[in-house]
Image (cartoon, grey):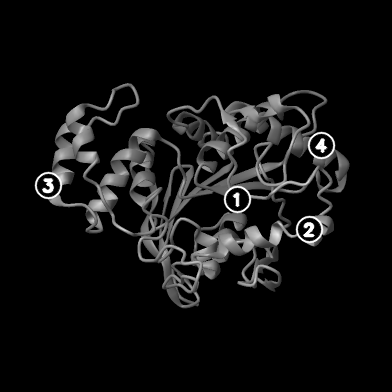
Amino acid sequence: MMELGPFRVNSDGQTLSHNKYAWNNVANVLFLESPAGVGFSYSNRTSDYVTGDKKTAEDSYTFLINWLERFPEYQTREFFITGESYAGHYIPQLAQLILHNNKITNQTVINLKGIAIGNAYIDDETQDSGTVDYLWSHAMVSDEVREGITLNCNFSPSVNVSEACQTYIDQIDIGDNYGYEIYAPSCDPQKGSFSMTGFDQCSDNYIDAYLNTQQVQASLHVTFPPKSWASCSDVVEWTDAPATVLPVIKELMNSGISVWLYSGDTDAVVAVTTTRYAIDLLKTSVKTPWYPWYAQAEVGGYAVRYENLTFVTVRGSGHFVPSYQPSRALALFSSFLAGELPPSKAN
């Protein structure tokens, strides 16, 4: 409701408006609230709220198999998985499980064709080093702090953070700035807060109000005992998360499915540099060199195709690409589905 869905919640928290750049303009879309305990998803067993990467992949796979068995007319359709941020963990591991289980006899086959992850959290080491370099390159960290971090910090997960390193990290201060979109203000509930792209930073608040309306919950057939909906949940206890999913991504790249990573370039939380550094570790060769791509006669961002991997940036977008740049996001998504690079010329 904030990003790629067919409706957006208006500022009154009670009414909806159409999103003309919704992704279901070009595909059938399933939205999954995952893991159990997030949003309206739930379990009758509290033990299911003790979860992690592995169980989340297994539960999501079970959901997909059950859904396809209930709606068999979709079983042969081409299937794609997309997501953002920590979906950098969710999606590769789910895709890996699908491909492995597709080889099992008498198992429903999921016709997986590709994955696309936006501002993807995929590797702890490059996440840390790439964030520092992004902040420095965008004039949000001083030369002295960056140099101190470069000289004193080893971001390898196997190395403990030294006291000297922590001293410099503690000096990072981006002020009253919104890390998910560095050129936008944080939400001001009194008057709303709009980014330069026109996206209202208070949209979370409007969605929260709407989905906690009794009439809305009844219309959505929310059948479990009354529950407050929230965009983030503290019910879930997380038990496992690998320091990197790059080996899984490498396996997917070699499997024949389409693998795309894309980054809004004004996000400082999972910055474009973190993804570029992670791609460097994959050591894959360039097939189509870096070039500007276009949407609605403007540069939409930049793209490069590697051997079995495509990377696309989205110009002027923060962490939530379909929120900040909906038309560019839809153009990117359409290219991904078609198996084509985004257009290199303005139409």
Bin the neighbour count of mark 2 within 10 Å (Cα to Cα): few under 14, some 14-19, many 20 and up.
Answer: few
Q: Mark 4 against mark 2, which lies toward the viewer?
A: 2
Say which residue appears at 39% left-offset and 56% top-offset.
267
The reply to whether residue 280 is in sight is no
* Relative to 181, 38 lies left or right: right
Mark closest to the chain's N terminus, 1 or 4: 4
Residue flagged by tag 3: what amino acid is it?
A: Glu
Mark closest to the chain's N terminus, 3 or 2: 3
Mark closest to the chain's N terminus, 2 or 1: 2
Residue tagged 2 = 214
Say which residue appears at 67% left-offset and 45% top-offset.
33
Q: Secondary structure at mark 2?
A: helix
Residue flagged by tag 4: what amino acid is it?
A: Asn
In the picture, residue 158 is in which quadrant? top left
Q: Secondary structure at mark 4?
A: helix
Residue tagged 4 = 66
Q: Are marks 4 and 3 in contact (CB under 8 Å)?
A: no
Q: Are marks 3 and 2 in contact (CB under 8 Å)?
A: no
CA distance for labels 1 and 4:
25 Å
* Relative to 311, 56 lies left or right: right
Say which residue appears at 66% left-offset and 30% top-offset.
49
Say which residue appears at 81% left-offset and 36% top-offset.
66
Residue tagged 1 = 231
Q: Secondary structure at mark 3?
A: helix
Mark closest to the chain's N terminus, 4 or 3: 4
Q: Mark 2 against mark 1, which lies toward the viewer?
A: 2
Mark closest to the chain's N terminus, 4 or 2: 4
Bin the neighbour count of mark 3 within 10 Å (Cα to Cα): few under 14, some 14-19, many 20 and up.
Answer: few
CA distance for labels 4 and 2:
29 Å
Residue tagged 3 = 144
